[in-house]
């Protein structure tokens, strides 16, 4: 059985080519809602960078957490030149830095890959007090 979040890596290039992106308005709405200033963000399950680029293009420094090395390789390429740091790690294993908590933690169609037993405690460790969590995707209700 494959580890959680490591199912797309063998087809990372095809995933990047064929997976639909997110509308620009997603980042605009999230940033308008978020408690300012949003300087640093953490993306959980960044994949190949479909949502990452929306926030980084608006000047947000994004730490893009992606557990699959192949997906992370494509992510590095698609975000080259943007304020993005790619970290190959699961959300659960990501090291918290008390002095650099993020203003925004977001996940685009990947939150379901995180461990429900620890996801909210990890979020509290990584998000600054008063920070914002944004979970969005292209999934179906129900």
Image (cartoon, rainbow, N blue to C red):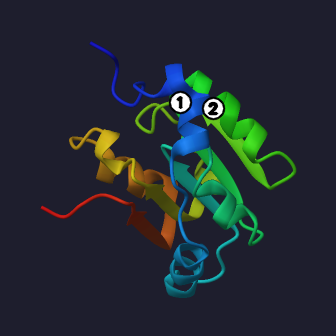
Q: In which quarter of the image is residue 52?
A: bottom right
The residue where tag 1 is placed is 89
Q: Residue 118 location, x and y as percent?
A: 28, 42
Q: Which of marks 1 and 2 is in front?
A: 2
Classify 138 as above or below 29: above
Labels 1 & 2 near each other (Cβ < 8 A): no
Residue 133 horizontal/vertical position (percent) = 43, 67
Left or right of 120 on screen, residue 110:
right
The image quadrant that residue 74 belongs to is top right
Residue 107 is tagged as: none
Q: Where is residue 56 in the image (x, y as percent from the top left)?
A: 72, 62
Q: Residues within 10 Å of mark 1 (few under 14, many from 20)?
A: some
Question: What is the secondary structure assignment of the residue under circle 1?
Answer: loop
Of callouts 1 and 2, the N-terminal one: 2
Q: In the picture, residue 41 is in which quadrant? A: bottom right
Q: Is mark 2 on a helix, strand or loop?
A: helix
Q: Nearer the viewer, residue 35 or 47?
A: 47
The Cα atoms of the two marked residues, 1 and 2, are separated by: 10 Å
Residue with the mark numbered 2: 72
């Amino acid at each position: 059985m494959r580890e959680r979040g490591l199912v797309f890596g063998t087809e990372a290039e095809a995933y990047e080519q064929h997976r639909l992106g997110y509308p620009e308005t997603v980042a605009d709405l999230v940033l308008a809602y978020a408690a300012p200033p949003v300087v640093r963000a953490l993306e959980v399950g960044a994949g190949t960078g479909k949502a990452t680029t929306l926030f980084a293009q608006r000047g947000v420094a994004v730490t893009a957490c992606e557990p699959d090395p192949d997906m992370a390789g494509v992510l590095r390429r698609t975000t080259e030149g943007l304020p993005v740091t790619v970290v190959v790690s699961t959300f659960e294993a990501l090291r918290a830095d008390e002095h650099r908590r993020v203003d925004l933690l977001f996940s685009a169609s990947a939150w379901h890959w995180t461990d429900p037993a620890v996801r909210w405690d990890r979020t509290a460790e990584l998000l600054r007090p008063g920070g914002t969590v944004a979970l969005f995707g292209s999934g179906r209700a129900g």
